[in-house]
Amino acid sequence: MTDDERPDLEDMVDELDWAYHAELFTVGYIHILTGAIERGDLDPGICPTAWENTMSAVELAMMEHVNGRMQGPTTITVEDVERMRRLHALGAAVLAGGERSSGLYALALRCMESLFGSDWKRIAEESESYVRAIHHCAPPSWRTVTDA
């Protein structure tokens, strides 16, 4: 392998940073969704576009784990990615005003745990605060998460 063929260290760091933030923001959005389910809120307060973009990004990041190009606090499997894809679809249906699957809450918890292991709850709570803070500082037309 020549120097030109080797991945640039800066590019690798950027990719890892991107993947970490995709995972971090995903648990924030999932935590907002599970909170809405627990409270019985009809509107979780998540912009469908933000959900779609974040969930697509995390699925790609998770495949980086599966393919051995990344490591994290857990070992992510193809089954974990498939669960995340199911959550992606079920969450999108809820955000579009559709019915909530009876297994949605349990699936959401399992997906958060697959990303961060036993520490998922603390990380999800922190991430939710980051998601809300970002959207609170954004111009009103960008805000996608309602304050609870």
Image: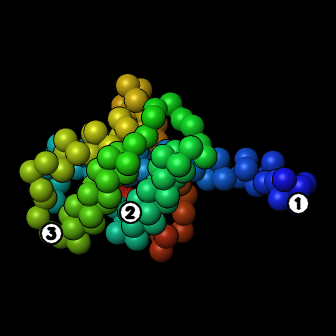
Q: Are marks 3 and 1 in contact (CB under 8 Å)?
A: no
Q: Residue at the location (27% across, 64% down)?
A: 89
Q: Is residue 105 left or right of residue 85?
A: left
Vertical comparison of 56 with 68: above or below: below
Q: Disc 1 on helix, strand or loop? A: loop
For this rendering, which residue is in front, 88 or 147?
88
**How far apart in space, not on screen, are marks 2 and 1 (Cα)?**
37 Å
For this rendering, which residue is in front, 36 or 91?
91
Q: Position of residue 28 (x, y in %)?
A: 41, 46
Q: Position of residue 32 (x, y in %)?
A: 32, 48
> Which residue is outermost to the top?
118
Q: Is residue 114 left or right of residue 104?
A: right
Q: Residues within 10 Å of mark 2 (few under 14, many from 20)?
A: many
According to the picture, the residue beneath numbered tag 3 turns out to be: 98
Q: Earlier in the sequence, mark 2 or mark 1?
A: 1
Q: Residue at the location (15% across, 69% down)?
A: 98
The answer, for residue 2, to whether it is visible in the render is yes
Q: Residue at the location (13% across, 48% down)?
A: 103
Question: Where on the picture, by quarter, is residue 47?
Answer: bottom left
Q: Residue at the location (81% across, 48% down)?
A: 9
Q: Position of residue 1 (x, y in %)?
A: 84, 53
Q: Residues within 10 Å of mark 1 (few under 14, many from 20)?
A: few
**How far apart in space, not on screen, are marks 2 and 3 (Cα)?**
15 Å
According to the picture, the residue beneath numbered tag 1 turns out to be: 4
Q: Disc 3 on helix, strand or loop? A: loop
Three-letter code for the amino acid on which mark 3 is drawn: Gly
According to the picture, the residue beneath numbered tag 2 turns out to be: 51
For this rendering, which residue is in front, 76 or 94?
76
The answer, for residue 54, to whether it is visible in the render is no
Three-letter code for the amino acid on which mark 2 is drawn: Trp
Q: Earlier in the sequence, mark 3 or mark 1?
A: 1
